[in-house]
Amino acid sequence: MNETNEIKILIVDDEPSIVTMLQMVLRKEGFQQLYTASSCREALETVSRVGADIVLLDIMLPDGSGLELCSRIREYGNPHILFLTAKASDLDVLTGFAMGGDDYITKPFNPLEIAARIKARIRRLDVAAPSNAVTPSQKDSRIYQFGRFSVNEAEGELIVDNQHVPCPAQVFQLLLHFCKHPGIVFSKTQLYEAVWGLDGLGDDSTVMVHIRRIRERIEWDPSDPKHLLTIRGLGYKLAKEPAKR
């Protein structure tokens, strides 16, 4: 997924002016495979028929909630889902991520920011994509082991207590970033810039929710983490050796 004209983008919004504006800007930015839907029903039909790499998803739709639709879309693949919402409270954001969203942007928004976030996502995937010519030793070097869990970069897998644990792409990328830099403290802004590829100012909620989603997968007790630690006033770090339970 490294050419803009190969990326399939589905815009799900019932406001024609927003859809038209996004189509115009995205086409100017080089994205050609654009699909639109104004309802949950149309969105699911489109995803099932042509698939999608990126979904721009309004939360308030005429025949249902975009939050519930997000989970349904996941049944057809693992696209990057960016919520477009007029709801910006912490609860709304947390709910959106809990339902499987990867990022969010509040209305009104600058459509160029949408394009920038999509391009940043594509760049992150290009950097993370394994080479077609990987020797066994190189492949082994991309397995990171930390106590009860391991991350296989080449295979995109998280193993916890010898069991494969499903991990959304953006959660996996954040965990992988920690695995590559154990013991180093990162602020929320640094993490957003490193993993989402954009200026992280004002995106604390995004990082915090994804930290929580990592802890739910790798910790015995997410409320009392031993691996992914909070360093008060500074940020977060992945312990080189997990603290004892």
Image (cartoon, rainbow, N blue to C red):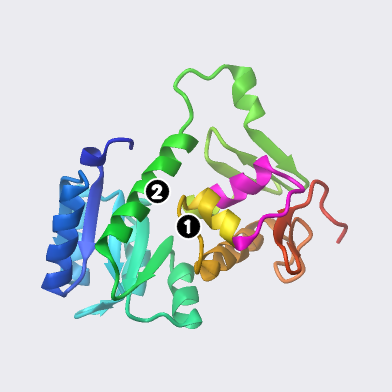
Residue 155 lies left or right of residue 228; in this view the side is left
Percent position (x, y) of residue 73?
A: 32, 60
> For the residue labelled by badge 1, is the local secondary structure a helix, a strand or a loop?
loop
Q: Image height check: is 151 above or below 142?
A: below
The circle drawn on residue 33 is none
Front disc: 1 or 2 = 1
Can I make out residue 225 in this image? yes
Q: Is residue 185 magenta?
A: yes
Q: Image height check: is 239 above or below 209?
A: above
User: In front here: 98 or 164?
Assistant: 98
Residue 173 lies left or right of residue 102; in this view the side is right
Q: Is residue 27 magenta?
A: no
Percent position (x, y) of residue 136?
A: 60, 18
Give the amino acid at mark 2: Arg
Q: Residue at x 33, y 75 (%)?
A: 85
Q: Residue at x 44, y 80 (%)?
A: 92
Mark 1, residue position: 199
Percent position (x, y) of residue 244?
A: 88, 57
Give the amino acid at mark 1: Asp
The circle drawn on residue 121 is 2
Sequence-first disc among 1 and 2: 2
Q: Image height check: is 216 above or below 133?
A: below
Which of the 4 image quarters holds residue 162? top right
Number of marks present in the image shown: 2
Which quarter of the rendered picture does the N terminus lie within? top left
Q: What's drawn in magenta, residue-wise?
A: 173-188
Judge the density around disc 2: few (<14), some (14-19), many (≥20) Cα neighbours within 10 Å: some
User: In front here: 84 or 101?
Assistant: 84
Q: Residue furthest right?
A: 244
Which quarter of the rendered picture does the C terminus lie within? bottom right
> For the residue labelled by badge 2, is the local secondary structure a helix, a strand or a loop?
helix
Q: Image height check: is 93 above or below 194?
A: below
